[in-house]
Image (tube, rainbow, N blue to C red):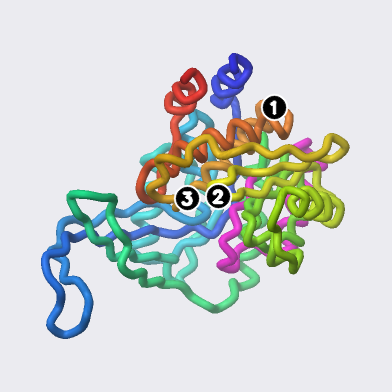
């Protein structure tokens, strides 16, 4: 475990570029006190409103919380939500110079209506999404590639956080592969099921359902996972494939080294899994960039994911929390 502590301490020397579909998570929080007469729904007394960076911005928040430097590339609207998201990221220490404002679309915003109670964690009642369905213009795509080239000059790794909202296409990952060859950069991706764009990356992460959908097969037992991860590794020509499995932990397969399953480190205190996958890919990327082998990186990411699910909403895990968990 001492090697993991040393690994965590080395995070401060790293800069990670995060390319992702950035969201503003908007929480409207109230306390339920009666049912509506108009419909069978609770009436909430407004208590507070909370904004957090979400989607492809959450890995960047985790990276700075872990003591490293993060540079965010993403698209925001020329609106107040975009200003809020940019400010929240900047105040947390994220380099926001790679955020691109697009006046033709709103900032992607997920507004959640949440009920509080005294006896349990807040419960989400509904969500309203604000998002353009129009494709990005050629000029915005060109700016994105330009920002990636600029920011990669001082980076240790490029992390793609793909929420399938239109930012990341094959031409952008092609640019990343070229930069990786030229500058010996690490490439990682939280693919969220759209796996083919990330061929030949160092690490590709998805969850169980996404792996099942991509392979068009059900993963029921350990033999299924061993076979499936082997197929993914070969088909995607990756160095490593990581599949998160909820309460069963995560599994990883590494080229020329084989398959490893890591049971969940925390199943007794799971309150909210929102953003746990972002924590996993952030920690795994930092660990690999700091010299860890893929299984060691997955082990540290698994521990961090177990911390993240103890909180509510997009929770970032700090170096101190990670150190304490390892020592315990």
Q: Considering only order in the chain, which callout, 1 or 2, is on the residue closer to the N terminus?
A: 2
Residue 321 as seen in the image, left or right of residue 252: left
Residue 2 vs residue 266, the one in the foreground: 266
- Which residue position holds label 2? 246
Magenta segment, which residues?
A: 159-185
Residue 10: x and y, percent? 59, 21
Residue 322 vs residue 267, the one in the foreground: 267
Residue 40: x and y, percent? 22, 80
Residue 109: x and y, percent? 40, 65
Residue 300 vs 275, above or below: the answer is above
Query: SS at mark 2?
Result: helix
Mark 1 surroundings: few (<14), some (14-19) or many (≥20) residues within 10 A:
some
Residue 148: x and y, percent? 65, 50
The residue lying at 47 percent from left, 41 percent from top is 267
Tell me whether circle 3 and circle 1 mark residues in contact (CB < 8 Å): no
Task: Determine the residue located farthest toward the bottom in the rendered image.
Answer: 38
Question: Visible in this render: residue 86?
Answer: no
- Which residue position holds label 3? 275
Mark 3 surroundings: few (<14), some (14-19) or many (≥20) residues within 10 A:
many
Q: Considering only order in the chain, which callout, 3 or 2, is on the residue closer to the N terminus?
A: 2
Q: CA distance from mark 3 to mark 1?
A: 23 Å
Task: State which mark lies toward you, 2 or 1.
Answer: 2
The numbered mark at residue 175 is none
Q: CA distance from mark 2 to mark 3?
A: 12 Å
- Which residue position holds label 1? 292
The residue lying at 67 percent from left, 56 percent from top is 145
Mark 2 surroundings: few (<14), some (14-19) or many (≥20) residues within 10 A:
some
């Amino acid at each position: 475990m001492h090697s993991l502590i040393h690994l965590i301490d080395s995070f401060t020397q790293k800069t990670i570029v995060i390319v992702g579909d950035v969201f503003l998570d908007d929480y409207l929080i109230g306390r339920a006190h009666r049912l509506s007469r108009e419909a069978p729904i609770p009436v909430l007394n407004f208590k507070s409103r909370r904004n957090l960076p979400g989607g492809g911005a959450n890995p960047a928040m985790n990276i700075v919380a872990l003591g490293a430097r993060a540079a965010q590339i993403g698209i925001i609207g020329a609106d107040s939500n975009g200003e809020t998201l940019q400010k929240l990221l900047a105040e947390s220490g994220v380099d926001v110079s790679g955020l691109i404002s697009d006046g033709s679309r709103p900032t992607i915003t997920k507004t959640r209506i949440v009920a509080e109670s005294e006896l349990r964690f807040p419960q989400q009642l509904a969500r309203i999404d604000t998002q353009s369905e129009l494709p990005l213009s050629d000029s915005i795509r060109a700016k994105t590639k330009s920002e990636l080239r600029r920011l990669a000059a001082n980076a240790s790794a490029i992390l793609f956080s793909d929420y399938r909202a239109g930012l990341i296409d094959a031409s952008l990952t092609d640019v990343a592969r070229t930069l990786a060859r030229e500058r010996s950069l690490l490439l990682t991706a939280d693919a969220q099921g759209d796996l083919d764009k990330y061929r030949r990356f160092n690490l590709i992460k998805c969850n169980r359902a996404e792996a099942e959908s991509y392979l068009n097969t059900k993963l029921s037992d350990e033999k299924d996972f061993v076979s499936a991860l082997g197929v993914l590794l070969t088909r995607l020509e990756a160095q490593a494939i990581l599949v998160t499995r909820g309460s069963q932990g995560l599994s990883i397969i590494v080229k020329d080294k084989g398959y490893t399953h890591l049971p969940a480190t925390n199943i007794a205190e799971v309150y909210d899994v929102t953003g746990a996958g972002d924590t996993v890919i952030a920690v795994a990327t930092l660990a690999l960039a700091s010299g860890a082998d893929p299984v060691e990186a997955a082990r540290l990411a698994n521990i961090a994911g177990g911390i993240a699910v103890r909180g509510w909403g997009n929770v970032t895990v700090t170096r101190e929390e990670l150190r304490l968990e390892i020592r315990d």
